[in-house]
Image (cartoon, helix red, strand yellow):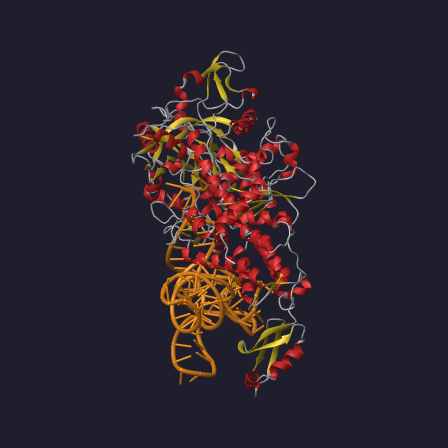
Amino acid sequence: MKYDFKAVEKKWQKKWEEGKVFEVSKDYTKPKFYALVEFPYPSGQGLHVGHPRSYTALDILARKRRLQGYNVLYPMGWDAFGLPTENFAIKNHIHPEIVTKQNVARFKSQLQALGLSFNWDNEINTTDPNYVKWTQWIFLQLFKKGLAYKKEMAVNWCTSCKCVLANEEVVGGVCERCGSEVIRKVKSQWMLKITEYAQRLIDDLDGVDYIERVKTSQKNWIGRSTGAEVDFSTTAGDDLKIYTTRPDTMYGATYMVISPEHPYIEKWADKLENMDEIRAYQEASARKSDFERTEMAKDKTGVMLKGVRGINPVNNEEIPIFISDYVLMSYGIGAIMAVPAHDTRDWEFAKKFGLPIIEVVKGGNVEEEAFTDCATGEMVNSGILNGLSVQEAIEKITQFLEEQGKGKFKVNYKLRDWVFSRQRYWGEPIPLVYCEKCGYVALPESELPLCLPNVESYEPTDDGESPLANITEWVNTTCPCCGAPARRETDTMPQWAGSSWYFLRYCDPTNNDALASKEALDYWMPVDWYNGGMEHTTLHLLYSRFWHKFLYDIGVVSTPEPYAKRTSHGMILGENGEKMSKSRGNVVNPDDIVNEYGADTLRLYEMFIGDFEKSAPWNTSSIKGCKRFLDRIFSLQDILVDGEGYSAKLESSMHKLVKKVSEDIENMKYNTAIAAMMSVLNDINGSITRGEYKTMLLLLNPFAPHMTEEAWELCGFGGAITDQSWPVYDEAKCKEAVVEIAVQVNGKIKARMDVPADATKEAVMELAAADAAVAENLAGKTVVKEIYVPGKLLNIVVR
RNA sequence: GCGGGUAUGGCGGAAUGGCAGACGCGCCAGAUUUAGGAUCUGGUGUCCUUCGGCGUGCAGGUUCAAGUCCUGUUACCCGCACCA
């Protein structure tokens, strides 16, 4: 029988939709399974073959769980705010809302054509006013708890477009759109205090099941380090506070460095003799873009402060203070003690400026290079620390500094607060009002959502303000607090805002009184299994954990972590092994594959392509193998024979297959699950019982849902597969009675033979000795050792 | 520089320390077909005429046995980048 995938796939998709087959049950007593994939940004390009890799993988889990009796939430939605839509709107003068609507419609039909079992009743869109309302509501809670604040920040500014650029829009130091120079411009930005959660974001990783590389990346990104804050006295009178991770090396500190933006420069202005030189340096480093600073990383520059010197608290020696842009204001406290003998950067700087280098840990040659790998060394030239190990020295000196009131133990993080402002149109307006008298005031909740006004131009203004700043009738309002005239905040939120809590809205997407009901959240959360790309590890994944922890603290959600389990898929590369991109001309359109081979084949191929976690190149000719496999499974109908059970010939194969496929799906080893099914298919010749065929179709159903339903129906097995139960296996029946083992002599294979699975070592030895090839190799030798691994091999060691 | 990852046939990839190359693609041969395509059957790491030898980036080591464990090393990919 020929399989007509075009007609069959449409038929079942219609049945699933009309029958609401995959919708969730409101019965909160059933066991639940919440499967989540990252919702897409509905771009103008349509779906990419990369999307279905993740979606199909969790679709397989969702479908399997439903057959296992779970109430499954597997929702989909649209992360629809964002720059490409806005840029398209600017260029074509179409409202972003209309563009979004069109793109969403296209994406949705593409996803439905793949037979993904999403709960479309729970669909959400981050640009929907009813969604924006709750995004803004969460922001207001953060604001009220003091976790949102305003700060002067350097932003990327395109000198030609006269507008603020996101980091992603700055490529190689120039504007991605026009190629002009990008400089740093200081603007006032809304910030979220994610740093307040840094330690909890690290600690709580211990309680969740994330793949290890995600945990590692998040920890490295948060970048915890321990050390000491130390007060150096200065000849100017005030103490200069520095941060170091190596307080043990304090006797080696021969100078100090502060960042060019350090406030003490202004404070000491009247004492500094070379203020002109210092100002010139400050201006030069302010003008440098990030790109230039990186380019110049090798060449250390700086200016010595004349008129003020620091005093090392461990030996009271006076040392010079420099300003240099190798010290960043944004990490630690923008000031360091420099130990050139044991820090590469300090060493380079000291060599260039002719500063003394004092070895304080034995073992290196500090005249040649900085000796940094010295955790196991012994302290020298270090007064009270001499002879101690590095570890002992750290403890002793920290204690000493504390006793002297000159320092204390200190933890630092690389993580910075989250820049939350965008001077853009297509985002959630920040729901605040600025009043001369009251400052920034939160909008009352009754005024949410604060919607975007209609504007004529979506371009940012000349001075880099959001296009909203030009809409005076929208901007001008009254203070919710005192009623005086006031102005709305015109910045909008970044795209990350909507995706930081979307998994909560899925639980109860139409709720008007809360972001989701308590019952729905308590039932569905946490997400049981979240799959997504590695590129979101340190952005979306961290941001959403932060928001969730905040919502936990204010009692909105009941779990401290949003995701119980996180896995990650590899990228699908172009046929040439490079990343798929329009410019490389190696993009594969999923629509074309669905048209030519069918959705089931595409799904199966993407799961068979290789290890799910690793990237894999696309290969159009390999798809044929998957198509052939599905056609052959479908054709098994022609050789169907009676019998609801398994035939003697296939019984153990079937039990093993159920076990293998069940376990492989749970471990996301889809490729080997499919290989196992192919292998069993290859063993079938002549006939297959109804029972065997049923099991095959059930196991294959999550991968190829359309074809298996059609075959099930044509064979008259009764009902739909979606109403059946996942097959079970009997461990005892997975074992074969007779197994082939390899016989080795000194590790070299000499023979293969069939032995009973439960044969003893002695029995197998006897059988082996009877084999001619083995006997030949044993002749005249002494057997020293016999290793028998049941079911695998026998190794006879002789001398 | 730092962090993470990868390395196995012509290709994608399999292998709880236990028969390397499952499964698929491609290729070869045969069947079927007017022909092509499609389909089906068999073969397919490599060297040698055979016996057999050699093979998992490279060099060592542990073990009866190593793709797998240990030490060192190289190449490539991804992320971060003066983080004191």
Q: On the image, which quarter does residue A299 sit in?
A: top left
Residue A568 seen in the figure: no
Image x and y of residue A108, in percent: 48, 39
Residue B79 vs A654, above or below: the answer is: above
Residue A396 vs A752, above or below: the answer is: above
Left or right, A412 with reference to B46: right
Image x and y of residue A179, in percent: 29, 36
**Quarter of the C terminus of chain A within the rendering:** bottom right
Taking the spot 53% from the left edge, 60% from the top edge, the residue there is: A635
Please count the marks in the image.
Answer: 0
Image x and y of residue A374, in percent: 47, 51
Q: On the image, which quarter does residue A523 sit in?
A: top right
Image x and y of residue A169, in percent: 37, 36
Taking the spot 44% from the left edge, 36% from the top edge, the residue there is: A103
Q: Nearer the viewer, residue A46 or A649?
A: A649
Residue B26 vs A407, above or below: the answer is: below
Q: Nearer the viewer, residue B84 or A529?
A: A529
Q: Nearer the viewer, residue A89 or A344?
A: A89
Residue A193 seen in the figure: yes
Residue projecting furthest to the bottom:
A780
Taking the spot 60% from the left edge, 56% from the top edge, the residue there is: A715
Q: On the image, which quarter does residue A511 sit in?
A: top right
Residue A747 vs A24, above or below: the answer is: below
